[in-house]
Image (spheres, rainbow, N blue to C red):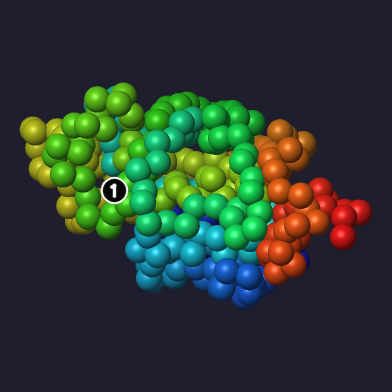
Amino acid sequence: MRARLAVIGGSGLYSIEGARLLEEIEVPTPWGLPSDRVMIAEVTGLPVAFLPRHGKGHRYLPSEVPSLANIWALKSLGVEQILSLSAVGSLTDACAPGDFVVCDELIDKTTRKPGSYFGQGVVGHVGFADPFCGGMRAAVTRVLAENGHPHHASGTYVCMEGPAFSTRAESQLHRSWKAALIGMTAVPEAKLAREAEICYATIAMVTDFDCWKTAGEDVSVEMVVATLKKNTAAVRRMLPAMVSALSGRQDCPCRHAASSAIMTDPALIPYDVRRRLELFYGRYWSGTS
């Protein structure tokens, strides 16, 4: 079964409760298996693919999430838009625990995560100035406003490696960059989605104030989990409206992001590499040997 919209659930969100499960699929990919089986559920009468980023039971560290396989698997099911749900820490008083932020910018501080489908004989460079899909962001922001949930229509997300939380010095450094949020999973997902020509947006759900705030308790797993439960309940209530809002979107520049990105002569790309990437770029290689 195919689905045009996918939801990648972050910490605390491992299933779409209340939705009618249509199918659960194991999707082998050239990069191994995804984080878990992909669930296709009916939401507001539409098929929606759901993938728990960390696997059911939260089995994968942020640096262990098989993002290459996750994005390929969703693309193979016909997905054109990915709504990412992610737990984050706040770097500003303006974004309080419980707030949702529809991110517009991204700073990549990761070092160990494979972050591209290009390489091994194929060179490509996609535009990434605006890392999150503007059309998706606008649609999701409208739903948050209509439901009266505390939210911010923009915010810069710093993605760190983890799994340890920030030091105080790191937290203050990130604040000096005027970033709003700190998290561990937006990269490489956002980059891979752009290479795969899939619209991608993140709802960052604030769980804590990181460790920069000297007044109050430092961030802990217990604090994060308590707020996670409230955030998860809120996003589940609004998910049907978000699905409806996103279902009306048609074409988008994100879906043509690689039209002029590949610099390598297709005839010189190794056969096994072409096979792995045919799903993404086959339409650009048609007519070449």
Compared with residue 88, is residue 79 higher up or lower down, i.e. above or below? below
The quadrant where residue 282 appears: bottom right
The percent coordinates of residue 66 (x first, y second) are 49, 64
Q: Residue furthest front?
A: 268
Compared with residue 286, is residue 181 higher up or lower down, i.e. above or below? above
Split into 4 quadrants, where in the image is the N terminus? bottom right
Q: Secondary structure at mark 1?
A: helix
The percent coordinates of residue 10 (x first, y second) are 43, 55
Compared across the picture, whether 32 is left or right of 203 comes to right
In front here: 283 or 181?
283
Q: Which residue is the site of mark 1?
A: 227
The quadrant where residue 95 appears: top left
The structure residue drawn at horizontal position 47% and vertical position 41%, both measured from the top left corner, is 203
Compared across the picture, whether 256 is left or right of 101 comes to right
Q: Is residue 256 visible?
A: no
In front here: 22 or 170?
170
In front here: 17 or 103?
103
The percent coordinates of residue 16 (x first, y second) are 53, 60
